[in-house]
Image (cartoon, rainbow, N blue to C red):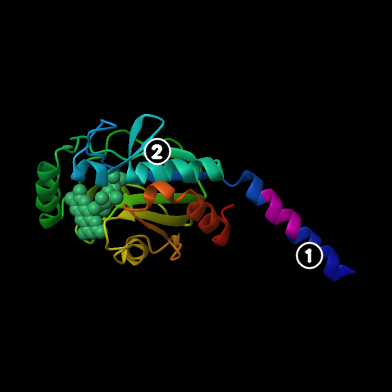
Amino acid sequence: MMKKLIFAFIAAAALCFSAFAKSLVVYFSVPESTKTSGLTRNEENSLVVVDEKALGNVQYVAGLIAEETGADIFRLEAKDAYPTDHTALLNRAAREQRANSRPEIRGKISDFESYDTVFVGYPIWNADLPPVLYSFFDGYDLSGKKVVPFTVHGGSGLAGTPRTIARLEPKAAVEQNAFSESRNTVDSCKERVSNWLKKIGEK
Ligand SMILES: Cc1cc2nc3c(=O)[nH]c(=O)nc-3n(C[C@H](O)[C@H](O)[C@H](O)COP(=O)(O)O)c2cc1C
């Protein structure tokens, strides 16, 4: 009897916590065009067209996660905006990564402390996190939070980034079953996102 009561109490407490737990999706994404048709190969690779809007690959997945989980959403942008021209973007990324740069982030996430779970989305840039992600992990305290990485890549998969994040945030619980989608199949990933969220207990 006592055991049953304890179980019921734990279940009720868990239910209460999940009802009040707050989630946030933070993402970085650089769609290389705002056009929705007549795209070059590079432009096509970097975006998904939804309802006549050009969304970056990671931006699209971030929206799906927010929709499925009811999380708030914040787009990480560098104060000095990234170019959308492919070659200029590659050059700036390479320059910043070589210099280990921490580009300044535009704006601030309000009430960041109040979130229990933070989904963090990014493209893979040269087999690593983009520099703005390093700025984010430097600038925000994720101690005690659950951090859930997701990416859309061009062939590298996660490139070890969940481990990199765990190293950067040793006091956070970093989900190692991160979501990874190829840009070639991103426009059909809705169900995979949903199944993954169920698997990691976020839906
Ligand atoms: C500067 C730069 C470097 C990239 N490096 C890689 C890489 O090393 N491995 C990979 O799989 N994809 C790489 N990509 C491809 C992106 O990860 C991929 O296109 C991603 O889906 C873009 O997401 P976004 O549209 O949300 O920015 C790179 C793209 C850029 C712009």
- Relative to the observer, which residue lies in front, 120 or 108? 120
Q: Please determine whether, in this image, residue 87 is positioned above or below residue 182.
A: above
Q: Position of residue 10 (x, y in %)?
A: 74, 61
- Relative to the observer, which residue lies in front, 189 or 25? 189
Q: What's the mark number on residue 74?
A: 2
Find the distance from the CA under tag 2 to the CA under tag 1: 37 Å
Q: Position of residue 181 (x, y in %)?
A: 37, 56
Label 1 crowd bin: few (<14), some (14–19), many (20+), radius 10 Å: few
Q: What's the mark number on residue 79?
A: none
Q: Which of the 4 image quarters holds residue 163? A: bottom left
**Is 184 a magenta residue?**
no
Residue found at x 26% / y 56%: 154
Residue identified by numbered label 1 = 7
Within 8 Å: ligand 1 and the Cβ of disc 2?
A: no
Kind of residue sitting beneath label 2: Phe
Q: Which residues are magenta?
A: 11-16
Q: Earlier in the sequence, mark 2 or mark 1?
A: 1
Kind of residue sitting beneath label 1: Phe
Residue found at x 51% / y 58%: 196
- Relative to the observer, which residue lies in front, 145 or 185? 185
For the residues bearing labels 2 and 1, Cβ distance under 8 angstroms:
no
- Secondary structure predominantly adopted by residues drawn in magenta: helix
Q: Secondary structure at mark 2?
A: strand
Q: Nearer the viewer, mark 2 or mark 1?
A: 2
Residue found at x 59% / y 52%: 203
Label 2 crowd bin: few (<14), some (14–19), many (20+), radius 10 Å: some
Within 8 Å: ligand 1 and the Cβ of disc 1?
A: no
Q: Position of residue 132 (x, y in %)?
A: 25, 47
Instruction: Give the quarter of the figure containing the N terminus.
Output: bottom right
Asked whether residue 103 is in view, the answer is no
Q: Secondary structure at mark 1?
A: helix
